[in-house]
Amino acid sequence: MNTIKSVGLVGLAITALFAGQAFATPCPAAPATGIQTQGAPVCIAPYGQDGPGTGLVNILAAPGSPNHNSHSIVTSGPSYNPYTQQVVPSAFWSMGATGASENKIVLEIAGNANNNSFGIFDPSNPSNYLQLFSGPAGAGWHTTLINLGNGNYTAAYFNASGNFMGQTSAHFGVTNLFGYYLSTDNGAPTFFSDAKMNQPGGNTYPNGMPHMVAYEGNNKTTLKTGNTSGTFLSNEWLLAWEDQAFGNSDLDYNDFIVLVESVHPVPEPAVLGMFGLGVLLIGGFAAMRRRSLKA
């Protein structure tokens, strides 16, 4: 087998890998409740163990729509459809030219609310992370994440009243590339924005369950975050999390919702490039070459 064909086949294999991840099997009933889910690529229940009216379909509903209620964060403009307006990819992220990103807790409807914490992790070493919110932080708390360059980050913490609560720094092994995580023990990451890093989720997610779903601002909808309201801008994102492993999950994705801005998702092929796609291709070619020689 010649080199061109080998590299071509490896490239096709990589393309097939990403393509396969874009198409989920039919949505299941949520294991914890038996309620049917829907959506793509992430299957979401209309509500979970918190009861009817608490699902993303209600949280993202505009005034005047049938699903709008006291849990809704939309104060004007069009509703969001949590099933059809999901953003892909959302595994890894990069910061914009300002070098700073505001992160604000929007809502928590979870028994783990006092323990759940949120932050960013180093793609080259997921055990290396920077916490943006600790468990006691609640709606309206915000954190300014500053990119100092060369993988150096600082997080400055503020409570709902705007009082400075301290700061923490971290150094990542890659420059301006990170993933988000949710911890259920107010510490090290438990679930990752990259689904492949999470445990499988039955037949629906054999390669890893997505614990986060992302929605992009439309410059039209107004959201209430804590005590303030503002237009949901195109450089802003809602990240909604499920804080239970698949077998115990109600798949409602309302357990922790955070608004982040001045960031953008990085396509997976670009992420591979940052980690050395050439090495992957060479390794794939070498393995295929060995098999062809044995044949």
Image (cartoon, rainbow, N blue to C red):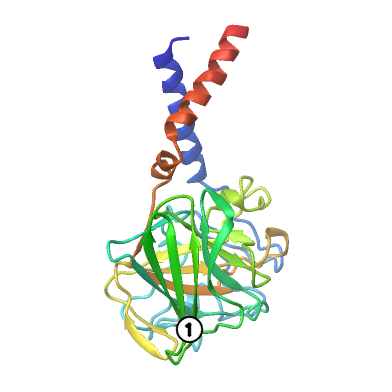
Tell me the SS state at disc 1. Answer: loop
Residue that mark 1 sits on = 141
Q: Considering only vertical position in the picture, is 165 above or below 88?
A: below
Q: Nearer the viewer, residue 231 or 204?
A: 231
Give left or right: position of 142 versus 293. Answer: left
Q: Nearer the viewer, residue 57 or 2?
A: 2
Give the residue displayed 65% in from the left and 61% down from the top. Answer: 29
What is the tally of numbered marks visible in this picture?
Answer: 1
Locate residue 133, reporting x and y percent.
54, 75
Identity, as a three-letter code, of the amino acid under mark 1: Trp
Locate residue 243, reporting x and y percent.
63, 68
Give left or right: position of 239 versus 192. Answer: left
Q: On the rendered image, what quadrant is the C terminus found in?
A: top right
Give the residue displayed 42% in from the left and 89% down from the top. Answer: 162
Q: Considering only vertical position in the picture, is 69 above or below 269?
A: below
Give the residue displayed 62% in from the left and 8% down from the top. Answer: 294
Locate residue 7, reporting x and y percent.
43, 21
Q: Nearer the viewer, residue 288 or 25?
A: 288
Q: Nearer the viewer, residue 190 or 89?
A: 190
- Can the viewer see residue 292? yes
Q: Considering only vertical position in the picture, is 246 above or below 18?
A: below
Give the residue displayed 48% in from the left and 54% down from the top. Answer: 91
Res 81 quadrant in image: bottom left
